[in-house]
Image (spheres, grey):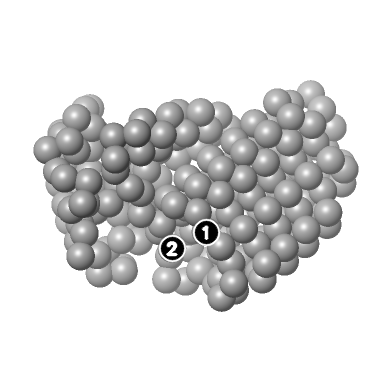
């Protein structure tokens, strides 16, 4: 059985370490060049370079960087370690409810209270955050973030790198474009183009 190392020591990393502990998994610690303080039972191991002292066959990485709208740094972390031969753990909180046929890519993180319904597919390195709800046949791309309390109706598409803010509602069949940002509390009733920011009720381009 592989051990786990969490990359990062911020708030999102702290929540992930708690999930790993709830799952009874072996967490070696976390990396953070700016901290040496233990988080729960997890020790700070140093900076990210320390990871290379472990064989890719013996550990799984957990991307501890959260998202505040720009997912490029999370994507960079994921891709750089993949190029070095390391793999990322898919992390699911015990209280999350997932249909048996949901497909999760490598490194997906599903937080507490999440509900994901049948037919949904989620790409690599994406976050479905606390109490978000994703209904049937949704397609979530790579490196996306569905923030806490977001509600996605059936057949919604969220393309690569998109960020849906806290409490967003997306009606059935709508598509959110690549790298776009949907502001907190927005209600999305029509497709959102790539590389734009929308907000409001109904959501409009800023």
In which quadrant is the N terminus drawn? bottom left
Residue 22 seen in the figure: yes
Residue 142 % position (x, y): 56, 43
Residue 74 lies left or right of residue 85; in this view the side is right
Give the label on residue 104, or none. 1
Q: Do labels 2 and 1 touch, CB within 8 Å?
A: yes
Reply above or below: 204 against 130.
above
Q: Residue 92 carries which label?
A: 2
Q: Can residue 37 be seen in this view?
A: no
Name the secondary structure under disc 1.
strand
Across and down, in percent, residue 140 comes to: 64, 50
Q: In this view, does 102 lie above or below 34?
A: below
Query: Viewed as shown, does residue 201 lie left or right of 8?
Result: right
Displayed quadrant of residue 102: bottom right
For marks 2 and 1, the one nearer the N-term is 2
**Which quadrant, please, contains the C terminus?**
top right
**Residue at position x 66%, y 71% from top?**
118
* Nearer the camera: disc 2 or disc 1: 1
């Amino acid at each position: 059985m592989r051990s786990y190392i969490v990359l990062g020591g911020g708030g999102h990393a702290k929540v992930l370490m708690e999930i790993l502990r709830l799952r009874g998994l072996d967490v070696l610690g976390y990396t953070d060049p700016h901290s040496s303080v233990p988080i729960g039972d997890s020790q700070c191991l140093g900076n990210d370079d320390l990871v290379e002292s472990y064989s890719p066959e013996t550990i799984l990485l957990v991307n501890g960087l959260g998202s505040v709208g720009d997912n490029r740094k999370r994507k960079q972390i994921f891709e750089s370690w993949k190029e070095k031969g390391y793999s990322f753990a898919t992390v699911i909180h015990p209280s999350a409810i997932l249909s048996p046929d949901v497909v999760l890519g490598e490194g997906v993180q599903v937080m507490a209270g999440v509900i994901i319904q049948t037919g949904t597919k989620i790409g690599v390195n994406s976050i479905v955050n606390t109490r978000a709800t994703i209904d049937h046949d949704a397609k979530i791309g790579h490196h996306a973030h569905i923030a806490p309390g977001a509600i996605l109706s059936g057949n919604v598409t969220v393309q690569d790198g998109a960020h849906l803010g806290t409490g967003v509602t997306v009606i059935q069949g709508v598509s959110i474009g690549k790298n776009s940002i949907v502001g907190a509390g927005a209600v999305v009733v029509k497709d959102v183009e790539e590389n734009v920011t929308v907000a409001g009720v109904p959501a409009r381009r800023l």
